[in-house]
Amino acid sequence: MPINVEYRGPIDLPKVIPVFPLSGALLLPRGQMPLNIFEPRYLAMVDDALRDGHRLIGMIQPDEVHSPGSEHPALFQVGCIGRITQLAESGDGRYILELTGVSRFKVIDEIAVTTPYRQCRVAYDEFIDDFTARKGEEEVDREGLLVALRQFLKANRLKVDWEGIDSAPNEALVNALAMMSPYGVAEKQALLEARDLKTRAEILIAVTEMDLAKKKTSGDPPLQ
């Protein structure tokens, strides 16, 4: 985990954070998320995050089902705060950065702000286990997860670095596969809100099996 700051618990994180609403984006503790920032409001958000020294941004999905077409959509209650661990300027006004997940958070409320980006008051207490690396990974059904992965890859004619997968600890494997999964907003939110790593792996297996069964029944072509 490429973070120079140690986050030992909720007390080490701010209670008010900038949030980046992005559908289909899933950040998990100790996972790495690349972002291409080009909208002026989010460029300002990154500048402010760097300026205040925290370098923290909350990733959260907009709940567009309950606010369709809104320019200010409702937010899901749970997101994940990440620290900017890499940043590069593109030369054309964009930032190319990487967030490393720290902890999930629950939104208490959204506050009125003058910044062009949204900010929320949040709490981390429900996710205290997020601060302990590899917590509960011995309970993960690794073989079941790998079986589902093999079936998914075969059905979609995809290849993967099996050497890297075989050497990955369970936490890194589960969270990386969850973050890279091609599923929708609801599935990504369920993976985020899973109470522990074992449950997240079980959800990932179940969603994958349902997706494969649906494609087999409907005759849909594989992903390209």
Image (spheres, grey):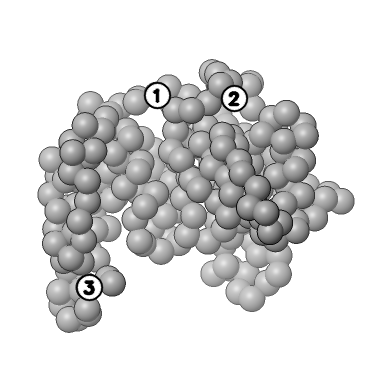
Q: Which residue is mark 3?
A: 222
| Marks 2/3: CA–CA distance | 43 Å
| Circle 1 or circle 2, nearest the eye | 1
| Foreground pick, 71 / 127 | 71
In this picture, residue 166 sits left or right of residue 16: left
Mark 2 and mark 3 residues within 8 Å of each other at the beta carbon: no
Amino acid type, residue under disc 2 in the picture: Pro
Say which residue label 2 marks.
Answer: 10
Query: Which SS class for mark 3?
Result: loop
Quarter of the picture containing the C terminus is bottom left
- Nearer mark to the viewer, of 1 and 3: 3
Q: CA distance from mark 1 to mark 2?
A: 15 Å
Q: Which residue is mark 1?
A: 133
Q: Measure how far apart labels 1 and 3 are at the Cα level.
A: 35 Å
Is residue 22 at all visible to an observer of this figure?
yes
- Circle 1/circle 2 CB separation < 8 Å: no
**Left or right: where does residue 8 sit relative to residue 114?**
left
Quick one: label 1, few (<14), some, or many (20+) residues within 10 Å?
A: few
